[in-house]
Image (spheres, helix red, strand yellow):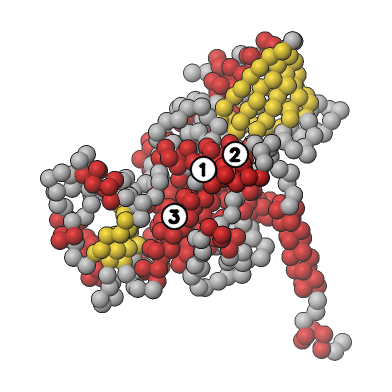
Amino acid sequence: MEFAELIRTGQAQAELLRGPEEPPLRGTLCITGHHLLLSPGPQATPDLWLLLLRNVDSIEKRVAGDSGTITLRCKDLRVLQLDIEGVEATLDIARSIEALSSLESVITSFPFFYRPKGLRLGDAWHFHPPECYYKRVAREVLLRAGQPLTGPQKRRCSEDEDLLRAVLAGAQPGARGFIVDTRSPQAAKQARMTGGGTEAKAAYPGWKRLHRPLETGRPLQESFVRLVEACGDLEQSMDRWLNRLESCRWLSHVKETLSTACLAAQSMEQEGACVLVHGAEGTDSTLLITSLAQLILDPLSRTMAGFQELIEREWIQAGHPFQLRCAHSAFSHARPKHEAPTFLLFLDCVWQLGRQFPLSLEFGEGMLLALFDHAYASPFGTFLCNNEKERCLCEVRTRTHSLWSGLSQPKEQRKLRNPLYVPNPLAIWPSAEPQSLRLWQGLFLRGTRPPEPSEVAWEKVWQIVTDQEKTEGSQPTDSASEAGP
């Protein structure tokens, strides 16, 4: 397939409305195989506006007279409006965007064509070998898995039983084991009828099962959609806003997730127990809990490099199906059952950690926003495909650039790092009480509010820290000041 076959018009004159307090941008609108471009022309600012077409979640078009309007709702939660000269041009551009933004073939996506200056293919793909982590935490026994396949006949697996028996045998004397099942007891019983089930208590001595049900799949996606709809309504009263915020239940999901992660972490830290976390398939809520538990307990996971290792190990290499889960964001009219913002829920929980412990994370909100954006639409190959097998078949690691390589560039670090970071060797125990949790305004309100105050405040903090470092660097040391000529 040639991209040119899907481009119905080459260019048109258009005006772009980008959001509150941002001036309109007028110029020539062009479409390529992967981007929407608007060039303001030589009389205006020389900057070229670019939008990765994969970022488009839904398109609305309307025409009136001899012009038309296209509204693009993006996966990163921005809403863009294009006023285009000519009815035919409007319709042709809309059809082109619809076709090019929904290409299903992985190898036709932009990461396979992206060749930025200063980066080489293959860089950073091997920055985070999991073996180093496992050696460092050899006695922090935290396991994740899918459900056992006991079925209605209550089948057993001797290898699985031997493995969990060996885990307890290798732990400290008297250690117990907890199986944190992220399904409800009823869901676990229903799963048995279709081949799944739970671990039989008699076959796993020393292990106790705890049910901590977490929503996944469509309920979680619907919660995300309702929250974004509420955040986009600028005319509602305060009472209606608060009612909608509560009814969408997003913060309830955050609360339940943090509470379960704290349970797993406390079992390990305070009781010296071994913990196995599992759900239905072991690729969604399971990863959520194990990754958050590590952030709570492990200081190195709270560094910039350690957090990237955590994402790579617990989400990408562990097989979270990003291609399925992040096919659409909150605006798409399609509602496939395989879509779910599980990774976004993880990022929101990490944001809550950073808000409650502002000095303990080396990375800031900028890192979390970047990860959200790239998980849904990215020029890098890190979040492509659903598992390692698919990445190998598509040659992702040899034919695309790693996101970690892109984020390691000096110009990106200022946006991502926390200027107030102070290494904290202790565990951090977040509060999951409703009064301690906040809406992540930097994400959910990014398209409806001006950048003030968080982004501007962030820049001011960076400037203060930079000025302080310059001052300290220019002051002579005691020994130098005391030395004679």
Q: Is residue 175 left or right of residue 301?
A: left
Residue name at image x 22 percent, y 60 percent: 163
Category of crowding for the residue at label 1, using alpha-carbon neighbours closer than 10 angstroms: few (below 14), some (14–19), many (at least 20): many
Query: Whole-percent x and y of residue 376?
Result: 53, 38
Which is nearer the eye, 170 or 353?
353
Label for residue 248? 1
Query: Whole-percent x and y of residue 242?
Result: 60, 46
Q: Circles 2 and 1: CB distance less than 8 Å?
A: yes
Residue name at image x 58 percent, y 30 percent: 56
Q: Separation of disc 1 and disc 3 at Cα?
A: 14 Å
Identified by mark 1, the residue type is: Cys
Residue name at image x 25 percent, y 63 percent: 208
Please tell me in which quadrant of the rendered image residue 54 appears.
top right
User: Which badge, 3 or 2, is on the more N-terminal residue?
Assistant: 2
Which is nearer the eye, 22 or 420?
22
Which is nearer the eye, 234 or 477?
234
Query: Whole-percent x and y of residue 139?
Result: 34, 70
Please tell me in which quadrant of the rendered image residue 110 appears.
top right
Residue name at image x 32 percent, y 63 percent: 275
Label for residue 205? none
Q: Circles 3 and 2: CB distance less than 8 Å?
A: no
> Can you see residue 378?
no
Farthest front residue?
A: 239
Give the residue number, with chain letter if any, for mark 2: 230
Category of crowding for the residue at label 3, using alpha-carbon neighbours closer than 10 angstroms: few (below 14), some (14–19), many (at least 20): some
Identified by mark 2, the residue type is: Ala
Q: Is residue 50 left or right of residue 402?
A: right
Give the residue number, with chain letter if any, for mark 3: 256
Tag 3, which secondary structure? helix
Q: Nearer the viewer, mark 1 or mark 3?
A: 1
Tag 1, which secondary structure? helix
Q: Separation of disc 3 and disc 2 at Cα?
A: 21 Å
